[in-house]
C-alpha cells in the first residue's frame, strides 16, 4: 500500500518539476510541493529499502567529492563556427545551398530549411540516459574528454532523473546535449547572498553557473538553482518504434559508437521528441526558410533578449534536415551545417584611465570611470558609472585596473568587476572628494542616503549647467539648439547665471557675445533665438517640469498643472493642498513646498515673469457652458468610476476650481468611498455633499 503511495508521490513530484521547469507553467504551489516531498521523505525514512537513485529525494544525496573524474565522450562535443554580421550569414547560406544543390537536397529556388535556436549563454553538458535513467553527466571539457559532474547535475530540478512516459518509449541509450545556465533573477539573488556573507561576487550568470556546477560539494550546487535546456544529442541507440536510418555523421563518430536509427529526420523533430521525453527544450526556436528569415529571427531576438529570464549571446542556425546535415558534414571540429550568429558582446574588459566625479542637476556627485575606449553592446564606450561611494568601495575599482564593463540595451554602461590579477602595483584606493569638483563647496551625505551632494546649489556651475540642460530639453521647454555643448559655453562664459538669463539672450549685448562663440553663426543664432521665443509661453506642465524640482517628473508635473491650474496656485499651495492631489505623496508635497520657500527660486520665477515668460494653463477640452464658473470643489475619498484627477479635470473644464480643504467658501464636496475628515468638516459647515452620480448630473445641467 505505502509502496504504491511512494511511487505515486514520485510521479507527481516529477510531473510538477516538468510543469515548472519545462513548461514554465507551475501546477502546484511551493508549499504543496514541499508537503508532498516531506511525505515522500518520511515514507522513505521508514523503508530505506524502497529508496532508488531516481527518487526526487535523492537529488542532493552524495557527499562532497575530492575531485572530478574524467569522462571520455562517446560522441565528441563540437563547437560552432561564429558569424558576427549578416554578410557572414549570407555566405554561410550560400555555401550550404551550393553543397545541397549538388546533392539534390534543395529545390531550384535554393531556399534551405533551417531551425533557428537561442544560443544559451551557459556551459555545455552531456547527460547520459540508459533505459530512461540518468546514469552520468559530464561537462564539455576539451570536447573529447570532460569532467564527471553527475552529483551536481542531479541537483538541477529541471533535469529529469528518469525520462517521462513509459519504459517502452525510452531508448536504450540517449545522450542529451544542452546548456546549463542560471536565470538572471537567481544570479542577482546569489550575488546578494554572497555579498551578505562577504564572499566573492560573480561577474555574470554564465560564470555563476560554471562556478556552481564545478562545486565539489553538491549541496552547494543545490542552493544555486541552475537550469538546463536541451539542444542536441550525442550517442543514441535502441530507439523503440519506427526510426529513420541515419549513417554515421562524422568520422569522429565512427571512432566510437555510431548512431543507429533516430526517431525523426529533422533537428526540429528531434527536439520535439526530446521534449516528449520530459527534457526541457526552450521555446526560443523556429523552423525558417532562407537567410532573410534567419536574419529576421535574429533581429527579433535581439529586441526580446532583455526581457528573457536568462541570457542568450546569439542565435544558432542549423540546417533542419538530418540528411542534409550529414551531407554537409564537418570541418575541423565544427559542423558545416550550423552557425552561431553572435550578438554584439555586452561585456568587455578594458583599462581604467581615471576616476572622475560628475555633479548632477540636484548636486549628486557620481563617481565615473574614464576608460580606454572599448566596443561593447554595439557602441564604443569611454565612460562607465560607479553609481555611488558604496558601490565604488565595494567594487574597489582603482586607476590602472583592468575591469569588466557591461552595456546591455540602452542602459548606462557600468563597471561590473575588477580583474584583480591584472592590478598594477601601488594602484591608489578609491576615495570620494571632500569638496565639489566643480565649485569647491562642501559635500554632504545625508543620513539614510547613498549620495554625496554638493551644497553649492545653483552657485555651482555644474548644477547650473545640468539644470539648464534639463530646462531646455525636449520634454521641458523644448528649446531646440540649446544643448549640452552650448549650455557649457554659456555658463563658462557667464552669459547665463540662471534660468531667467535664457530669456535675455535676444538683447543686443548678449547677441554680440553669442556671435563671438566658436561655431555660432548668424543663422544658428537666429534659430536659437526663435526657439527661445517659442518657449516664452510654455504649457504649464512643461514649465513645472522644467523647474527641475526634486521628485517632480513629467507625470507629476502634469498632475500638478491639472489640479492647480496656474503657477501662482502652485506657488501658494501648502502641503495639505498638495497632498489632496491624487498621486501626490508626502515626499513630492514636501519637495514642491520647499522649492517655493527658497528665496532664490522665487527671485528666478519673478524675473521670468518680468521677462514675459507666461506658462499657459492646460487646454482641457473646454465645455461650451461654464456650468461651474466660480464654484470651488473639494474632492475626497475614492470615486466609483473616475480618479480624483479626472474629477478635478471635469471641474476645471466646467470653469470651477478645486481646493484641498473645506471652508465656508467651498461650494460642494464631492465624496467617494472612505472619505474622512473632509466629509465630516463639510457636514459640520453644512456644505452640500455630492456623490459621483450627482456630480455628473450637475455637470450635465
Ligand atoms: S549546438 C555541434 N545549439 O554554444 C554543435 N549549441 O559555440 C553543438 N550553445 O558549446 C552545439 N546554445 O555550449 C548548440 N542552441 C544551441 C546552443 C549551443 C548554446 C553553446 C554550446 C556550444 C557553444 C558553441
Image: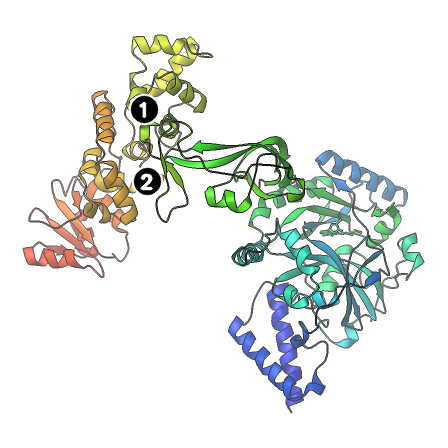
Position of residue 88 in the picture relative to residue 224 (left or right): right
Quadrant position of residue 216? bottom right
Position of residue 604 in the picture relative to residue 80 (left or right): left
Whether residue 231 is visible to the viewer of this picture, yes or no, is no
For the residue pair 536 and 183, the one nearer the viewer reads as 183
Quadrant position of residue 127? bottom right
For the residue pair 153 and 11, the one nearer the viewer reads as 153
Question: Is the residue marked by circle 2 packed among few (<14), some (14-19), or many (20+) residues within 10 Å?
Answer: many
For the residue pair 200 and 283, the one nearer the viewer reads as 200
Whether residue 115 is visible to the viewer of this picture, yes or no, is yes
| Residue 475: % across, % down | 38, 32
Q: Which mark is residue 535?
A: 1
- Image point (70%, 65%), residue name: 152
Residue at image mark 2: 552
Confirm if mark 1 falls within 8 A of ligand 1.
no
Q: Which mark is residue 111?
A: none
Tag 1, which secondary structure?
Answer: loop
Q: Is residue 510 above or below residue 497?
A: above
- Image point (65%, 64%), residue name: 221
Quarter occupied by the N terminus: bottom right
Tag 2, which secondary structure?
Answer: loop
The mark nearer the N terminus, 2 or 1, is: 1
Farthest residue in the bottom direction?
A: 1
What whole-number distance in Å separates the C-alpha atoms at marks 2 and 1? 20 Å
Amino acid at each position: 500500500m505505502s509502496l504504491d503511495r511512494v511511487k505515486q508521490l514520485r510521479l507527481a513530484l516529477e510531473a510538477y518539476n516538468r510543469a515548472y521547469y519545462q513548461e514554465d507553467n507551475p501546477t502546484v504551489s511551493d508549499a504543496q510541493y514541499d508537503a508532498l516531498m516531506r511525505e515522500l521523505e518520511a515514507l522513505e525514512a521508514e523503508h530505506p529499502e524502497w529508496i532508488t537513485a531516481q527518487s526526487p529525494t535523492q537529488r542532493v544525496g552524495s557527499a562532497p567529492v575530492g575531485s572530478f573524474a574524467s569522462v571520455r565522450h562517446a560522441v565528441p562535443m563540437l563547437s560552432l563556427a561564429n558569424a558576427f554580421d549578416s554578410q557572414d550569414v549570407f555566405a554561410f547560406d550560400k555555401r550550404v545551398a551550393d553543397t545541397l544543390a549538388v546533392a539534390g537536397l534543395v529545390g531550384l529556388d535554393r531556399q534551405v530549411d533551417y531551425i533557428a535556436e537561442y544560443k544559451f549563454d551557459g556551459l555545455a553538458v552531456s547527460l547520459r540516459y540508459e533505459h530512461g535513467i540518468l546514469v552520468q553527466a559530464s561537462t564539455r571539457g576539451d570536447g573529447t574528454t570532460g569532467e564527471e559532474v553527475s552529483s551536481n547535475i542531479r541537483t538541477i530540478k529541471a533535469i529529469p532523473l528518469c525520462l517521462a512516459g513509459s519504459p517502452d518509449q525510452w531508448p536504450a541509450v540517449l545522450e542529451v546535449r544542452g546548456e546549463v545556465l542560471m536565470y538572471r533573477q537567481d544570479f542577482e539573488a546569489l550575488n546578494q547572498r554572497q555579498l551578505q556573507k562577504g564572499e566573492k561576487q560573480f561577474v555574470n550568470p554564465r560564470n555563476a553557473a560554471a562556478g556552481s556546477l564545478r562545486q565539489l560539494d553538491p549541496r552547494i550546487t543545490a542552493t544555486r538553482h541552475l537550469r538546463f535546456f536541451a539542444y542536441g544529442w550525442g550517442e543514441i541507440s535502441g530507439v523503440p518504434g519506427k526510426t529513420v536510418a541515419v549513417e554515421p555523421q562524422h568520422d569522429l563518430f565512427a571512432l566510437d559508437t555510431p548512431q543507429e536509427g533516430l526517431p525523426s529526420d529533422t533537428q526540429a523533430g528531434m527536439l520535439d521528441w526530446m521534449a516528449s521525453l520530459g527534457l526541457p527544450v526552450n521555446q526560443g526556436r523556429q523552423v525558417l526558410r532562407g537567410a532573410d528569415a534567419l536574419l529576421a529571427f535574429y533581429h527579433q531576438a535581439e529586441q526580446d533578449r532583455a526581457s528573457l529570464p536568462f541570457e542568450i549571446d546569439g542565435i544558432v542556425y542549423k540546417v533542419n534536415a538530418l540528411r542534409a546535415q550529414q551531407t554537409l558534414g564537418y570541418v575541423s571540429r565544427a559542423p558545416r551545417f550550423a552557425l552561431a550568429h553572435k550578438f554584439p558582446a555586452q561585456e568587455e574588459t578594458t583599462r581604467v584611465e581615471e576616476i572622475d566625479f560628475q555633479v548632477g542637476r540636484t548636486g549628486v556627485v557620481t563617481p565615473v570611470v574614464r576608460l580606454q575606449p572599448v566596443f561593447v553592446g554595439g557602441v564604443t564606450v569611454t565612460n562607465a558609472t560607479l553609481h555611488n561611494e558604496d558601490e565604488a568601495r565595494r567594487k574597489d575599482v582603482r586607476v590602472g585596473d583592468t575591469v569588466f564593463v557591461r552595456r546591455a540595451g540602452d542602459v548606462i554602461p557600468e563597471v561590473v568587476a575588477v580583474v584583480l590579477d591584472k592590478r598594477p602595483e601601488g594602484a591608489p584606493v578609491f576615495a570620494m572628494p571632500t569638496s565639489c569638483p566643480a565649485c569647491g563647496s562642501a559635500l554632504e551625505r545625508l543620513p539614510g542616503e547613498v549620495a554625496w551632494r554638493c551644497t553649492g546649489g545653483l552657485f555651482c556651475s555644474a548644477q547650473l549647467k545640468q539644470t539648464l540642460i534639463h530646462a531646455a530639453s525636449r520634454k521641458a521647454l523644448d528649446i531646440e539648439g540649446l544643448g549640452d555643448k552650448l549650455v557649457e559655453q554659456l555658463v563658462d562664459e557667464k552669459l547665463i547665471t540662471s534660468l531667467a538669463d535664457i530669456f535675455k539672450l535676444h538683447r543686443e549685448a548678449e547677441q554680440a557675445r553669442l556671435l563671438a562663440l566658436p561655431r555660432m553663426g548668424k543663422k544658428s543664432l537666429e534659430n536659437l533665438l526663435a526657439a527661445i521665443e517659442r518657449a516664452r509661453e510654455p504649457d504649464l506642465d512643461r514649465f513645472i517640469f522644467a523647474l527641475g524640482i526634486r521628485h517632480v517628473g513629467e507625470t507629476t508635473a502634469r498632475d500638478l498643472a491639472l489640479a492647480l491650474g496656474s503657477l501662482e496656485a502652485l506657488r501658494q499651495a501648502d502641503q495639505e493642498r498638495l497632498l489632496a492631489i491624487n498621486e501626490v505623496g508626502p515626499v513630492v508635497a514636501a519637495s514642491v513646498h520647499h522649492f517655493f520657500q527658497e528665496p532664490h527660486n522665487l527671485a528666478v520665477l519673478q524675473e521670468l515673469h518680468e521677462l514675459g515668460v507666461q506658462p499657459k494653463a492646460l487646454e482641457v477640452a473646454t465645455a461650451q457652458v461654464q456650468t461651474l464658473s466660480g464654484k470651488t470643489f473639494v474632492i475626497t475619498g475614492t470615486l466609483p468610476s473616475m480618479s480624483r484627477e479626472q474629477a478635478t479635470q471635469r471641474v476645471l473644464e466646467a470653469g470651477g476650481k478645486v481646493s484641498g480643504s473645506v471652508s465656508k467658501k467651498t461650494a460642494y464636496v464631492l465624496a467617494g468611498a472612505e472619505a474622512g475628515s473632509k466629509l465630516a468638516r463639510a457636514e459640520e459647515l453644512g456644505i452640500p455633499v455630492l456623490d459621483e452620480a450627482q456630480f455628473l448630473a450637475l455637470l450635465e445641467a
